[in-house]
């Protein structure tokens, strides 16, 4: 199995049926969760997975809508008697703050706690950060309000999916998305550190992707307007991410 499930597709303000943006990237051997803003536990079950099977957690940046549920996720894994180690990947500043957040809950005193390893991502990004049977995951820094990484996944059947994460248009997003089958592009709007749907279409064109999926978009805007703005500069297929959509 090689797939990406959109666990949440909302921007910072979730709404019923649409949680903050987070993803599950799966190959036979690796189950990589990307971010955990809203409570991801129920969402993983809804996606036919479980908190016990997640092998890696990538924290893209330290904003509450991307990391806010980390202590609850880890506590639930512990309560469910997980024994398998979990690797948490992130930039140094992200991991430092994540550790501090967990320490507020005295997680060092939880009896029978499973092993958690922290893997620091270099500032310049990492080629093949996570390599498993069937999957190569690389990251590059993008341009957001705090240090943030974007993601490129290559599956063994050759398919490539990129996720911009929160960012304004920048060369590294185009680099991540170069020739991808699918670009999951944030489209929060025209603001510092973010991308508008129209800019998302421009990025998709410049990167030469086959399909553009808008995510982390403003859910108060009429959906057709978001799609039209992206379709203006991009002639490939455009879709809106929805919770539990499989890419
Ligand atoms: Zn953010």
Image: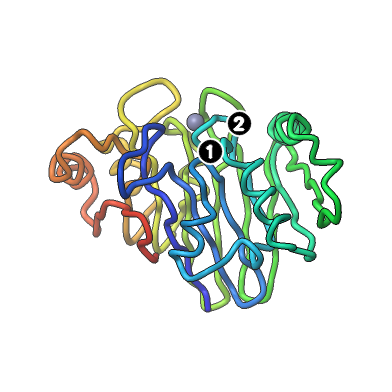
Q: Quadrant of residue 149?
A: top right
Q: Which residue is mark 2?
A: 62
Does 205 sit above or below residue 103? below
Q: Is residue 89 visible?
A: yes
**Residue found 67% across the figure and 76% down from its top:** 133
Q: Residue at x 13, y 45 (%)?
A: 224
Q: How far apart are labels 2 and 1 at the CA level?
A: 7 Å
Residue 128 seen: no
| Residue drawn at (75%, 54%) of the image | 87
Q: Is residue 96 left or right of residue 177?
A: right
SS for callout 1: helix
Q: Name the residue nearer the viewer: 118 or 85.
A: 85
Instruction: Decide if ligand 1 comes within 8 Å of the CB at mark 1.
Output: yes
Describe the colour scheme in one phrase.
rainbow
Compared to residue 46, the image places residue 163 above or below, namely above
Q: Quadrant of residue 181?
A: bottom left
Q: In the picture provided, is 231 more to the left or to the right than 43? A: left
Residue 160 point in image, percent of width and height: 48, 64
Image spot of residue 246 (x, y percent): 39, 66
Quadrant of res 29: bottom right
**Residue 196 point in image, percent of width and height:** 30, 32
Where residue 3 sits: x, y (%)? 48, 70
At x 68% / y 33%, what residue is drawn?
94
Mark 2 neighbour density, 10 Å: few (under 14) some (14–19) many (20 or more): many
Label 2–label 1 contact, CB within 8 A: yes
164 is higher (above) or lower (below) than 169: below
How would you rate the neighbour count of disc 1 (Cα within 10 Å): few for under 14, some for 14-19, many for 20 or more? Answer: many
Q: Secondary structure at mark 2?
A: loop
- Give me the disc on residue 66: 1
């Amino acid at each position: 199995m090689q797939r990406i499930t959109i666990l949440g597709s909302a921007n910072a303000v979730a709404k019923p049926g649409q949680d903050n943006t987070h993803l599950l990237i799966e190959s036979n051997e690796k189950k990589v969760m990307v971010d955990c803003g809203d409570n991801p536990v129920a969402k993983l079950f809804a996606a036919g997975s479980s908190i016990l099977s997640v092998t890696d957690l990538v924290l893209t940046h330290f904003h509450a809508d991307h990391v806010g549920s980390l202590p609850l996720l880890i506590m639930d894994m512990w309560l469910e008697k997980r024994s398998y180690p979990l690797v948490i990947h992130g930039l140094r500043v992200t991991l430092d703050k994540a550790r501090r957040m967990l320490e507020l809950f005295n997680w060092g005193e939880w009896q029978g706690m499973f092993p958690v390893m922290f893997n620091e991502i270099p500032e310049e990004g990492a080629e093949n950060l996570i390599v498993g049977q069937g999957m190569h995951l690389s990251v590059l820094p993008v341009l957001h309000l705090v240090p943030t990484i974007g993601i490129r996944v290559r599956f063994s059947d050759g398919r490539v999916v990129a996720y911009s994460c929160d960012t304004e248009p920048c060369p590294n997003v185009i680099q991540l998305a170069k020739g991808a089958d699918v670009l999951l592009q944030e489209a929060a709007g025209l603001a510092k550190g973010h991308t508008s749907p129209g800019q998302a279409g421009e990025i998709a064109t410049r990167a030469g992707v086959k399909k553009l999926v808008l995510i982390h978009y403003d859910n108060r805007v009429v959906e057709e307007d978001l799609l039209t703005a992206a379709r203006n500069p991009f002639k490939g297929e455009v879709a809106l991410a929805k919770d539990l959509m499989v890419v």
